[in-house]
Image: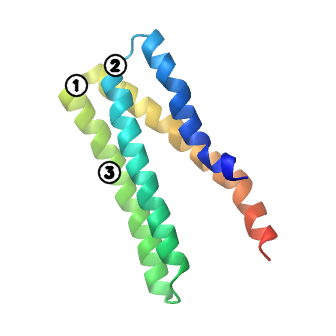
């Protein structure tokens, strides 16, 4: 099941040759790869911290704050990519980010209920 939670990174790796073959802006792929990795690290950190707290306000604050902050971080990264490297790079970065989010969201919706059921 652990591999399922890394399918977004598998997609990121698979898109690298696609970007090369299709002559898409490598700057877009690089910006998304770095930003996605950072936001996933922040997500893991927030979840680990949330699991160690007994205070519901701290739990909600960590998870909700992390969610909102990571969304803004990705949006600003895409915007900056478009401003610095051009519209085509910004569009490629946006499409790649949407694809990565879709994979991550789908995997979590499919496997999270089974993970929680197995821990009971």
| Residue with the mark numbered 1 | 85
| Residue with the mark numbered 3 | 73
Residue sitting at 80 percent across and 77 percent down? Answer: 120
Residue sitting at 56 percent across and 26 percent down? Answer: 14
Q: Nearer the viewer, mark 3 or mark 2?
A: 2
Distance Cα–Cα, label 3 vs label 2 = 21 Å
Sooner in the amino-acid sequence: mark 1 or mark 2: 2
Judging from the image, the colouring scheme is rainbow
Q: Residues within 10 Å of mark 3 (few under 14, many from 20)?
A: some
Q: Nearer the viewer, residue 103 or 48?
A: 48
| Residue with the mark numbered 2 | 25
Disc 1 to disc 2: CB gap under 8 Å? yes
At mark 1, the secondary structure is helix
Looking at the image, residue 8 sits to the left or right of residue 34; the answer is: right
Residue sitting at 58 percent across and 46 percent down? Answer: 104
Sooner in the amino-acid sequence: mark 3 or mark 2: 2
Distance Cα–Cα, label 1 vs label 3 = 18 Å
Q: Residues within 10 Å of mark 2 (few under 14, many from 20)?
A: some
Direction bottom: furthest residue: 55
Disc 3 to disc 2: CB gap under 8 Å? no
Q: Position of residue 32 (x, y in %)?
A: 38, 36
Distance Cα–Cα, label 1 vs label 2 = 8 Å
Q: Position of residue 117 (x, y in %)?
A: 80, 69
At mark 2, the secondary structure is loop
């Amino acid at each position: 099941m652990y591999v399922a939670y890394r399918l977004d990174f598998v997609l990121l790796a698979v898109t690298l040759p696609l970007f090369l073959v299709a002559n898409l802006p490598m700057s877009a792929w690089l910006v998304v790869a770095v930003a996605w990795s950072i936001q996933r690290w922040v997500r893991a950190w927030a979840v680990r911290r949330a699991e160690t707290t007994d205070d519901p306000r701290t739990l909600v604050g960590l998870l909700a704050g992390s969610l909102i902050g990571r969304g803004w971080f990705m949006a600003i990264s895409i915007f900056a990519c478009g401003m610095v490297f051009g519209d085509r790079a910004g569009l490629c970065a946006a499409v790649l980010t949407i694809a990565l989010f879709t994979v991550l969201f789908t995997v979590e919706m499919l496997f999270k209920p089974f993970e929680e059921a197995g821990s009971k």
